[in-house]
Image: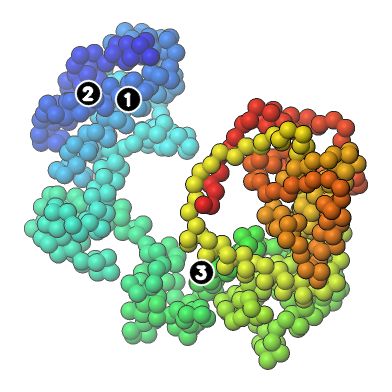
Amino acid sequence: MGSLDHGAKELQPEDSLDQSIEQSIEQSIEQSLDQSLDQSLDHALDQSLDHAAENSMKLETDDSMDHSTKYQNGELGAENDMTLQVAIGPMTRSKTKLLNQAINTLLQHIEGSLKPEACPTTLVVIQAIFYLDSTTEKKKQHMVSWKRVCLPKSDGGLGIREAKHMNKALLAKVGWRILHDTTSLWAQVLRSKYKVENVHDMSWLRVKCNWSSTWRSIGLGLREAVLPGLSWVIGDGREIRFWNDKWLAETPLRELATTVLPAGFEEIRVCDVWREGSGWDFTYVSKFATEQTKLMLASVVFDNVTAPERVRVFIWLVVNQVIMTNVERRRRHLSDTDLCSVCKQGEESIIHVLRDCPAQRGIWSRIVDARKLRSFFEQNLLGWLYRNLGEDADTDGSPWSTMFALGIWWSWKWRCGNVFGTDWKCRDRVQFLKDRTKEVSMAHVMIHDQSRRARREERMIRWLPPGDNWIKLNTDGASRGVCSAPLAELWGVYYGLYIAWEKRITRLELEVDSEIVVGFLKTGINDSHPLSFLIRLCYGFLSRDWIVRVSHVYREANRLANRLANYAYSLSLGFHLLESKPDVIDFIVFDDAFGSARPRYVRL
């Protein structure tokens, strides 16, 4: 670090401002600002430039340090001019940082009195002169336009910030504070003097002749930077005007209306159009909104559905009408036919797969209330999705929106299984959907309740070796949509107990990372439960003449079994007894052997 600090000092001589910016450039800045650069500004620039130089030197080699130092002292010959002008090499990176640091410090120092038009233009010229190492006596050829130099690095530029854009951003920052800050003295003075109202009425931003230069600058930042990007976030909807405010799209909905709005509609608030428990009241919307607007409104409802994240993502794909049905595949020239592969009776469109195909229609007919069947099967796709996903009526103790969401997701999953030959038998799909809906609803309620009252703390979790004269058995199961996770976990427990018994182990510590499975093994299960047969098989081993301790561990302490369970997917179907450990678990074995721990937030 000593050499790096020394290099930075060599790069910045005693009078940093005089060396980095020539006397003529300093005079140009003073003239453009109508004020002199006082000692405090010199000090601020010195500190920023020293900091920039030190950071830039940390990225350079010793050679590049010498190269940069010589350039600052004017010792480079003509043979290096071309390299510097085409913007490559270490000196270019240092200059870029110096320019950005200097212009940031300068603009922040004179932010309140900066003239928003003439001054930044002058500073841009000064920036370019400094970067190209030009002087008033000797001007060098520009090989790349200044606009291209100022582009972001991701767009092919060097990332130098233009003074006019930095100035506008800083003024917008002050304007944003005025909109939100109602307690500071300076904000109260400006809000009172210039009659700053709420953002619904921007008449206070119209330029007047008696405005001060400070307020003119702030007004410019508000008009050109803040207001174009200003939008509302939905809360209770009492402050947001449905048609006139920008809250749903990038423009107010008034500009997207198909016809002229009736008198009084412009003042309707978002809360006036929302009906608790049923969603949007389309009597205010249908006649004036486009289909795209209705789709965006519906997406607000879709995101609130109680369902697993993968189901909600699927609903989003359905709303955007991009799932790969035969109709979509044919449109993209990926298939020769759009015929339904199941019923062979019509086009395999989205609405056909999810509702109208006889295979799925029979399921819906048993689930939907008989009084609603007609309207259920007559709606178009978006209306059908919106109405059902926004309905919170109870169905067998669960929200209808949850059952509907799971119903359309499983209809697509069953269709894909049929097409790709991975379909699995389900004796009663209606009962299956009801069971899954109840599980999701109960999980949502439990998580919601626990998240409100549970506190967590960070703990370091690691695998612990067994006690003396004991053998530890870690089991896990992997499920990729073929069966439920508890079923896979229980098969892992069963085969683990089988192998341990065959090895004539008398004292066994069994660790499982599923609390549900541990609960089944400790407290039992009802005979009507679909996993009861497997629990009985495990009990057959647990009741034999040996000692087995069953305990739950976190996944961080069960990484080896978890990795082996997933590794099994790379093997052929059947029972595999590995006599030696595969290479894929070497690093986990090493971590467990040396007691490596991982952090986890645990509920107290």
Mark 2 or 1, nearer chain start: 2
Which sits in the foreground, 513 or 465? 465
Q: Where residue 505 sits: x, y (%)?
A: 85, 39
- Circle 1 packing at 10 Å, graded few (<14), some (14-19), many (20+), is many
Q: Where residue 142 sits: x, y (%)?
A: 36, 26
**Residue denoted by label 2:** 46
The answer, for residue 329, to whether it is visible in the render is no
Q: Which mark is residue 52?
A: 1
Q: Is residue 375 left or right of residue 75?
A: right
**Residue denoted by label 3:** 300
Three-letter amino acid code of the residue under disc 1: Ala
Mark 2 or 3, nearer chain start: 2
Q: In the rendered view, would you say 203 is above or below 187?
A: below
As measured in the structure, the alpha-carbon distance from the residue carrying label 2 to the one carrying label 3 is 52 Å
- Circle 3 packing at 10 Å, graded few (<14), some (14-19), many (20+), is some
Which sits in the foreground, 192 or 528? 528
